[in-house]
Image: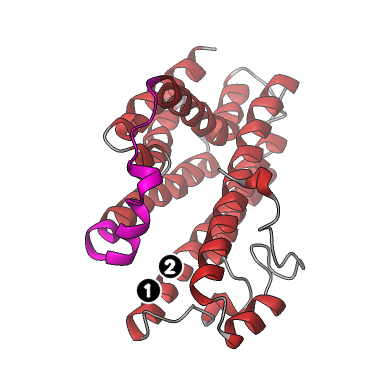
Amino acid sequence: MTFLLVMLAISFAVSALGWIYFIYFFSIGYGFSISALAVAIPLMFAENLSLPAILLCCVMFVYGIRLSLYLLIRERRSASYKKILYQPDNTKRKPLFAMFMIWISCALLYVGQMSPVAFYLYNSANGVAVADIWAWVGVAVAALGVIIEIIADAQKSRAKSVNACRFVDTGLYRIVRCPNYFGEILMWTGSYVFCIGASATPWQWVIASLGYIGIVYVMFSGARRLELRQSEVYGSDPDFKNYISRTPLIIPFVPIYSVAKHTWLKG
């Protein structure tokens, strides 16, 4: 359908930031792509907008802009983050074919993630009965996810400003070791809920599900990388060992304490 092609073109154009530096496909290219799609979708369906759809797009726009600006500022100001960002594996020149495949995969993923609200508006415009109650639930869940992310990032920055050499176990980090990743999963769960209200067709569910599963995989992959990196830095610290033995990795109150052995999460 035309609107999906437009979304894909926008996603390709913005995520092309990755051609400047490989990691940008997944970082600032990701955030700005989501923001761009959050603007494009309401414009494409301007005559059939609903309040929950507008609010979800606003949430996604704020999320994407905040993420990309946060990462750009962090890259400029944090020596430790810059060291991770520009490690040899990241700076090594990638084969052209691999770069194209990553670019294509990222563009498709971002469209899949943002597709539920587009399907909701498209179906509504074509006379399909949509359920606003599910749309409102989706907005609430997505907004909560963004709030959790913002709080988690602020708490981590504050803790690191006090003691840059210690792991963070205060605030939300008392409950879960990766509250920012949990917040993002929650946010995209809210977006995915829109498919219920949209009376989505099977092919729409497939596209949205691939986007949702893809971003959940990325979050668990990121949590695994963080776990390995923290184990390398803090592994000999008894307090850290006690912390990771009692604090879930990514989903609060779900006793998943480690995914290090799951090499299929390597991303």
User: Is 122 located above or below residue 66 in the figure?
Assistant: above
Badge 2 crowding class, 10 Å Cα cut-off, few under 14, some 14 to 19, many 20 or more, is: some
- Residue 131, quarter of picture: top right
Tell me the kind of residue under disc 2: Asp
Mark identifier at residue 153:
2
User: Is 180 located above or below residue 8 in the figure?
Assistant: below
Residue 96: where, in percent of width, then height?
Answer: 37, 21
Between residue 49 and residue 227, name the one nearer to us.
Answer: 227
Residue visible at 47% across and 16% down in the picture: 5
Identify the element where label 1 is drawn: helix
* Apparent side of residue 197 relative to residue 142 in the rendered image (left or right): right
- Residue 79, quarter of picture: bottom left
Report the predominant secondary structure element of the magenta stretch. helix
Q: Which residue is mark 1?
A: 157
Residue 59: where, in percent of width, then height?
Answer: 46, 50
User: Is 25 located above or below residue 253 in the figure?
Assistant: above
Residue visible at 69% across and 37% down in the picture: 197
Image quadrant holding the N terminus, namely top right
Judge whether residue 247 can be spotted in this image: yes
Mark identifier at residue 185:
none
Badge 1 crowding class, 10 Å Cα cut-off, few under 14, some 14 to 19, many 20 or more, is: some
- Residue 260, quarter of picture: bottom right
Residue 183: where, in percent of width, then height?
Answer: 56, 59
Q: Is residue 76 magenta?
A: yes
Residue visible at 54% across and 56% down in the picture: 225
Residue 129: where, in percent of width, then height?
Answer: 70, 27
The boundaries of the magenta stretch are 73-96
